[in-house]
Image (cartoon, rainbow, N blue to C red):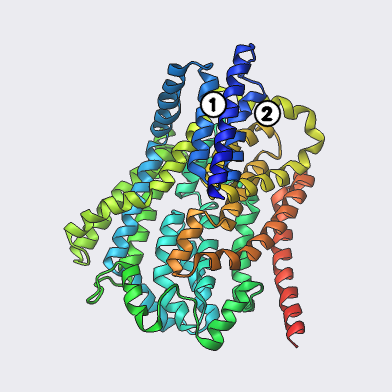
């Protein structure tokens, strides 16, 4: 099947190249026409066929470069290397550094053994199953800087706690996954905020200001958090998840991947990567580095914002004017230095161990770096072809459908993210188009942007090839397919409620879309779970 997909993708690429060359020879104009949408559309189609993001995005870049270079071979190569990839790396240098520093911090925390220390502490202080799930949720929310940071930490920290309360590992994986990308997508101090800021080109708003203003309309992310809290408090599950939870409670079968019970301690020791005889890290060795990272990143953002304002203005003004691509790496590199000094002085890691974490951190972030670079390269090509102008002109005659467009954008983003397994690649493709559909003067501008972001998170949450989905199952040490199949009904439930919320937001935007849609979404989520629990009880009876 994979060979067939690759063959079909290759045929599509060749056909498109031939079509572009023939059209150019016939005098067809690429700039500002439907042809400007061909690169992202082909990237989407290839992603749906191959289920692979990197090559699909790169093919889109190549097709865009051929059109920008007007079918000249040497000019095409120059466009790909300079205008696309090199400019993408240069434009995203700040966020790329931030990702690397995050990876190093994660490696340092794991190396210190502080994650296991926190797990041991929580195991003695958390008494109930509901408490264990809410504690896992709270830790996931706390680590809002980056979803990779979240996935790589929460699983190893909370596994001993959830095991003690007989919570299946697939349930742990779901909570990890549900508090990774959704939390980062509504946290203004995160790698996601910086990535989104880089994909938006606005004349009226800075990237971080637009991200913050869009948060109230990110219904999927908000309702996912409501869903996790409600299902933990109600204490029930449905779908395949209930089967795993029943096994865990009755038989003690937690669904630990390929690990016999008598080998569990050794396996967890390898997963934690902390010192084994015994771990030197303590509870505060986890808390202090996280606090240091958050404080310095916030400070870096505020400093850059105040520098832009000439040292005057409020905190909100500073956040509005800050450049996340400068503020986040500024703060994170200082935080990294302080964290290394702290852990070395504490003697929980040696200086040599700390230096060994540098390449480990870089390697962990290579997927995110690659996706961001390719997505930005594709954006550069669509901008050069004036895709935004074409879409904006085409949508002028569709004003009567404006109220339904946020819901449609949400569905499209879901499909793309599910197929490619990447949120960043999805909003890298869609945000420039969505920005053209909803002018900045439109009351639906922020709703449309949020619909794109929420759909990207939803599709990524459901996708079996998503990096965060894969890392969540790895962090919980459960079978990956089991994790995907058990969380899919939950994600689809929230997605359906979110879709209706976007329809409501589009229809009632003049009355304050967020203040109508969010209460509806929250109420619908809670009511659904209560009704589902009662129905399951009735069937069991």
Q: Is residue 389 left or right of residue 54?
A: right
Q: CA distance from mark 2 to mark 1?
A: 16 Å
Question: Can you give x and y, in whole percent of width and height, for residue 204 in the image?
Answer: 58, 31
Question: Can you give x and y, in whole percent of width and height, for residue 296 in the image?
Answer: 35, 51
Is residue 441 in view? Answer: no
| Residue 247 drawn above or below residue 362 | below
Identified at 73% across, 27% down, the residue is 394
- Say which residue label 1 marks: 64
Identified at 46% across, 41% down, the residue is 372
User: Looking at the rendering, in which quadrant would you find the C terminus?
Assistant: bottom right
SS state under label 2: helix
The numbered mark at residue 137 is: none
Identified at 67% across, 44% down, the residue is 412
Q: Is residue 345 left or right of residue 449?
A: left
Q: Nearer the viewer, residue 465 or 431?
A: 465
Local packing at callout 2 (Cα closer than 10 Å; few below 14, some 14-19, many 20+) is many
The numbered mark at residue 391 is: 2
Q: Earlier in the sequence, mark 2 or mark 1?
A: 1
Question: Can you give x and y, in whole percent of width and height, for residue 283 in the image?
Answer: 33, 72
Identified at 48% across, 84% down, the residue is 127
Question: Can you give x and y, in whole percent of width and height, for residue 200 in the image?
Answer: 55, 35
| Residue 228 drawn above or below residue 323 | below
Closer to us: mark 2 or mark 1? 1
Local packing at callout 1 (Cα closer than 10 Å; few below 14, some 14-19, many 20+) is many
Quick check: marks 2 and 1 in contact, CB under 8 Å? no
């Amino acid at each position: 099947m994979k060979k067939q997909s690759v063959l079909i993708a290759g045929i599509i690429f060749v056909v498109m190249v031939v079509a572009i060359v023939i059209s150019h020879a016939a005098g067809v104009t690429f700039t500002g026409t439907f042809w400007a949408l061909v690169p992202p559309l082909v990237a989407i189609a290839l992603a749906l066929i191959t289920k692979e993001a990197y090559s699909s995005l790169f093919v889109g870049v190549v097709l865009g470069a051929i059109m920008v270079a007007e079918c000249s071979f040497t000019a095409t190569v120059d466009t790909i290397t300079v205008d696309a990839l090199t400019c993408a790396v240069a434009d995203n240098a700040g966020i790329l550094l931030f990702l690397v520093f995050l990876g190093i911090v994660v490696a340092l925390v794991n190396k210190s053994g502080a994650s296991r220390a926190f797990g041991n502490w929580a195991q003695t202080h958390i008494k109930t199953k509901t408490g264990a799930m809410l504690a896992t949720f709270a830790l996931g929310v706390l680590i809002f800087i980056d979803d990779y940071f979240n996935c790589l930490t929460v699983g190893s920290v909370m596994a001993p706690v959830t095991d003690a309360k007989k919570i299946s590992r697939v349930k742990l994986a779901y909570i990890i996954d549900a508090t990774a990308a959704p939390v980062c997508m509504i946290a203004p101090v995160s790698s996601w905020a910086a990535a989104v800021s880089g994909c938006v080109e606005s004349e009226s708003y800075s990237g971080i200001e637009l991200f913050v203003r869009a948060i109230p309309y990110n219904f999927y992310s908000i309702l996912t958090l409501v869903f996790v809290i409600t299902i933990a408090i109600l204490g029930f599950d449905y779908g395949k998840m209930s089967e795993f939870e029943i096994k865990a409670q009755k038989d003690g079968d937690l669904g630990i991947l390929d690990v016999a019970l008598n080998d569990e301690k050794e396996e967890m020791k390898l997963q934690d990567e902390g010192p084994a005889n015994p771990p030197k890290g303590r509870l505060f060795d986890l808390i202090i580095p996280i606090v240091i990272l958050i404080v310095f990143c916030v400070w870096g953002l505020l400093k850059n914002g105040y520098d832009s304002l000439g040292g005057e203005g409020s905190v909100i003004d500073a956040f509005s004017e800050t450049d996340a691509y400068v503020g986040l790496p500024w703060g994170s590199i200082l935080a990294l230095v302080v964290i290394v000094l702290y852990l070395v002085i504490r003697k929980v890691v040696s200086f040599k161990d700390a230096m060994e974490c540098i390449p480990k951190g870089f390697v962990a972030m290579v997927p995110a770096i690659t996706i961001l670079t390719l997505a930005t390269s594709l954006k550069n090509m669509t901008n050069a072809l004036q895709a935004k102008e074409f879409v904006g002109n085409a949508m002028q005659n569709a004003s009567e459908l404006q109220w339904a467009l946020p819901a449609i954008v949400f569905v499209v983003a879901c499909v793309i993210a599910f197929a490619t397994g990447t949120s960043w690649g999805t909003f890298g493709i869609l945000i420039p188009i969505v920005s053209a559909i909803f002018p900045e003067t439109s009351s639906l501008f922020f709703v449309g942007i949020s619909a794109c972001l929420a759909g990207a998170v939803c599709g990524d949450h459901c996708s079996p090839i998503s990096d965060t989905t894969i890392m969540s199952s790895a962090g919980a040490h459960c079978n990956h397919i089991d994790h995907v199949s058990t969380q899919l009904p939950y994600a689809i439930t929230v997605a359906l409620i979110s879709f209706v919320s976007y329809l409501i937001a589009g229809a009632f935007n003049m009355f304050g879309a967020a203040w109508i849609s969010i209460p509806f979404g929250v109420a619908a989520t809670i009511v659904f779970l209560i009704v589902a629990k009662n129905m399951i009880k009735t069937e069991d009876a």
